[in-house]
Image (tube, rainbow, N blue to C red):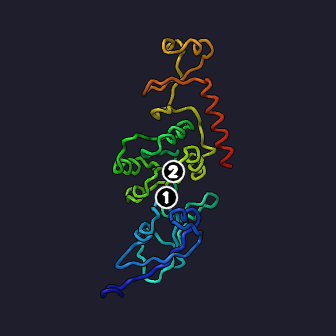
Amino acid sequence: MQGGIVVKKAYFRFYGELNDFFKKNFEQKVRTYSFRGRQTVKDCVESMGVPHTEVAAVIQNGRQADFSALVNNQDYLSVFPAMRKLNFPKEIQLREPYQGKYRFILDSHLGKLARYLRMLGFDTLYKNNYQDPELAEISAREKRILLTRDLGLLKRSKIVYGFFIRYDDPAVQLRTVLWRYKLKNKISAFGRCMECNTELIPVNKNEIMDRLEPKTKKYFHKFYLCPECSKIYWKGSHFTEMNNFIRKTLEEDE
């Protein structure tokens, strides 16, 4: 007791990649959390530095708990991330499994990652001037997975599906997202505009002839057009380079 206020203690054990959020990354270390008054599981977990979007399941004193459960003095909680090779029983999952085709929205620090995801065919919203409230609102309204480097943003209560990007290298970021969401078999490359995210449509070469360089006119015959921003795509040298990048990325994701 301090100044007449009871100080409570609860014990948390974070598993797997949730330990990334602690300065000393000792996996499966029991951490003591001291607090006063009424605090929920979500309050405690996020006060310790782990966004709720990173947590897949919580066991409190041997029983399943949701984020709204109150934490009491001397409680013991086990906190789990999403498991790539293990699916938790539905009754202990903290949120409904993501349904349908994977769709993303990215913050302003992840422009290169946005292009990579679009290249692989994933519906990916990105603008370099999105504000945090707007990102949270779109993510919640459209059920898009929010990818961000901002821990505070992921703690916004509106956000249900989100993932903290831990690395600076965009290629590594991409591999991490593919790994986290098991996307390797969901890739449909080169069907979406890398600039604006719109699905591409085939276009007759004669319709765009005036926009093509002489060598492109001579050696290429199959083209695709973005109906939104009018960017033209064809299978030139850039296509080979992107194919090599995709192959290397998937190999390293094994």
Considering depth in this image, is 241 or 44 the residue closer to the camera? 241
Residue at disc 2, secondary structure: loop
**Residue located beneath label 1 in the image:** 96
Where, by quadrant of the figure, is residue 26 drawn? bottom right
Q: How many marks?
A: 2
Considering depth in this image, is 216 or 75 the residue closer to the camera? 216
3D distance between C-alphas at marks 1 and 2 = 8 Å
Relative image position of residue 27 (x, y in whole percent): 59, 69
**Which residue type does callout 1 highlight?**
Glu
Q: In the figure, is residue 45 to the left or right of 28?
A: left
| Residue 99 - label | 2
Residue 130 showing in the rendered view: yes
Q: In the figure, is residue 93 to the left or right of 182?
A: left
Residue 120 sits above or below residue 237 on the image? below
Quadrant occupied by the N terminus: bottom left
Residue at disc 1, secondary structure: loop
**Which residue type does callout 2 highlight?**
Gln
Going 56% across and 11% down the picture, which residue do you hit? 214
Going 51% across and 25% down the picture, which residue do you hit? 201
Going 45% across and 48% down the picture, which residue do you hit? 144
Relative image position of residue 99 (x, y in whole percent): 51, 50
Going 55% across and 36% down the picture, which residue do you hit? 119
Considering depth in this image, is 77 or 202 the residue closer to the camera? 77
Residue 83 sits above or below residue 211 on the image? below
Q: Are dots 1 and 2 in contact, CB under 8 Å?
A: yes
Residue 123 showing in the rendered view: no
Packing grade of label 1 (10 A; few <14, some 14-19, many >=20) is few
